[in-house]
Amino acid sequence: MVCRLADGAADLATHHAIRRSVFVLEQGVFAESDHDSRDDHATTLHVVGFVDGLPGGVVRLFPLDPSNPAGEWQGDRLAVLPEFRSSGLGRPLVRFAVATAARLGGSRMIAHVQPANRTFFRRLGWVQRGAPELYVGIPHLPMDIDLVVAAS
């Protein structure tokens, strides 16, 4: 498995196609598209994960304050296509996002995680911080990870 930052229009199109497949077509989280203004921001990083050379999953990350990449980051839009879920691609995608934010000087990464994925994130070192919150009408758990600790 290989994870890398989207490099060029084709990678970015693949990234968005996987997100649409999971969040719009499969889960119905969004009606038409999960694309938002954050996708167009210069500091947003789009990651694509590959299994045996085939794109199978994605994650998006960005500093919460674009003028301060040494502060908090957010990871979101983690999506793995159904046919790649048994490959374990989700772990390297999350680890890649965490390592990238840490390498860029981030101190902490936050995420809003669907409750079914709580144990998955806990096993990767994430901690739940508070009660479930509604996001697009679906409960999500606020979770975070210390990037300094995760990078060491």
Image (cartoon, rainbow, N blue to C red):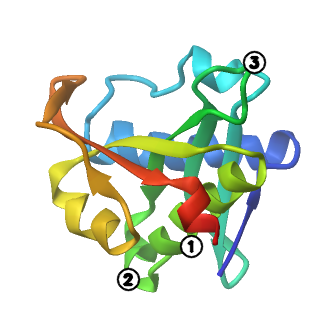
Residue 107, placed above or below residue 44: below
**Quarter of image, res 48:** bottom right
| In this rendering, position of residue 79 left or right of residue 148 | left
Q: Amino acid at mark 3?
A: Ser
Q: Which residue is mark 3?
A: 67
SS at mark 1 in the image:
helix
Can you tell which quarter of the image residue 134 is in? top left
Q: How many marks?
A: 3
User: Mark 1 or 2 closer to N-term?
Assistant: 2
- Tell me the element at label 2: helix
In the image, what residue type sits under mark 2? Ser
Of residues 113 and 128, the one nearer the viewer is 128
- Per the image, the residue denoted by label 1 is 92
Residue position marked by numbered label 2 in the rendering: 86
Question: Which residue is rendered at x = 61% and y = 56% of the image?
Answer: 97
Spot occupied by residue 92 in the image (x, y as percentages of width and height): 56, 73
Pinpoint residue 78: horizontal percent, then vertical percent.
Answer: 46, 51
* Of residues 125 and 36, the one drawn nearer to the viewer in this rendering: 125
Indicate the position of residue 72 as horizontal and vertical percent values.
56, 34
Alpha carbon separation for disc pair 1 and 2: 13 Å
Q: Nearer the viewer, mark 1 or mark 2?
A: 1
Mark 3 and mark 1: span between their CA atoms? 28 Å
- The residue most toward the right is 8
> From mark 2 to mark 3, how far is it between C-alphas?
38 Å
